[in-house]
Amino acid sequence: MFEAVYFGWDVPVWGVALAATLIGGIVRGFTGFGFALILISALLLVADPVSVVPLTLIIDLLAGFTLLPRTYRDVHWTGIRQLLIGSAIGVPAGFACLLLVAPEPMKIAIYAAILLSVILIACGFKMATVPNNRMLTGTGIVSGLMSGAAGVPGPPMVLLYLSSPLPVAITRATGIAFFIFVDIFAIALAAYKGLMDADMLIRCAILIPVMAVGTSIGHRLFGITRPETVKLAAIILLGVLAIVGIGKVLVV
């Protein structure tokens, strides 16, 4: 019944892709992050990583570009600069760790650290001041390490800003801008490794309008929602992703 294949995917895979793209778009538009994690987590259940990761990066990049014009005034650009400096150090170190350390224990440690941070923030932990350059650079290094070792750069940056006295709108906007730079770097690496093909680009073209609808819905929800609700949604999402990440490593 589902044997027909369209641009490399059969009907069940397309069903998962369309649903995950819409949900991920809503989450991305609402919280400023989470699209790539949701789409990759869903599609890896039914498709191979080679067909999933480059596609997700491209759609996530375009999601960022659709949101940035509406949020750039709130971006903490000083923070972006320091985060990128740290990431430039952390990404190569993360790839080196992959070669020297078994990835499963490293991923469990990373996700456990995220979960602990989420619990601390949920219990009311707050920094008294805005993150300084040293903290931002350090967070960028950890984000880079996580990107190289586990492919998950976002949680450290989001957790740092959520625990700061900065408004939620700044956390959301800064995440949107930061992930644009990360996605561009990752897409360049994917293209260099020859992971782009015609079917993948067609799949992107089909899913991009679905993503655009989702991010538009999420952005409108953000505009009519209390900041505390947005922060709670982000904390819950990070916690769930950390638990799922640990579970995936242990099950595999």
Image (spheres, rainbow, N blue to C red):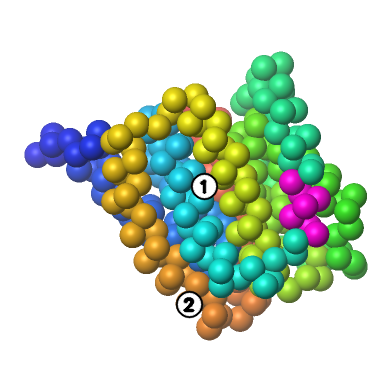
Q: Amino acid at mark 1?
A: Leu
Q: Is residue 120 magenta?
A: no
The dot on residue 37 is 1
Location of residue 180 in the rendering, given as x and y in whole percent from the top left corner:
59, 52
Marked residue nearer the N-terminal end (1 or 2): 1
Side (left or right) of 131 relative to 250: right
Location of residue 143 in the rendering, given as x and y in whole percent from the top left corner:
71, 43
- Overall secondary structure of the magenta section: helix
The magenta segment is: 78-84
Residue 117, visible in the rendered structure: no
Q: Is residue 50 above or below residue 173?
A: above
| SS for callout 1 | helix
Location of residue 138 in the rendering, given as x and y in whole percent from the top left corner:
83, 45
Side (left or right) of 61 relative to 156: left
Query: Seen from this angle, which residue lies furthest left?
Result: 1
Q: Which residue is mark 2?
A: 220
Residue 177, visible in the rendered structure: yes
Front residue of this view, candidates 135 and 209: 209
Location of residue 22 in the rendering, given as x and y in whole percent from the top left corner:
37, 59
Q: Amino acid at mark 2?
A: Arg
- Observer-side mark, 1 or 2, equals 2
Q: Local crowd at mark 2 within 10 Å, few (<14), some, or many (≥20)?
A: few
- Quick one: quadrant of the N terminus? top left
The dot on residue 138 is none
User: Which residue is at a point 81% across and 70% down the rendered structure image?
Assistant: 165
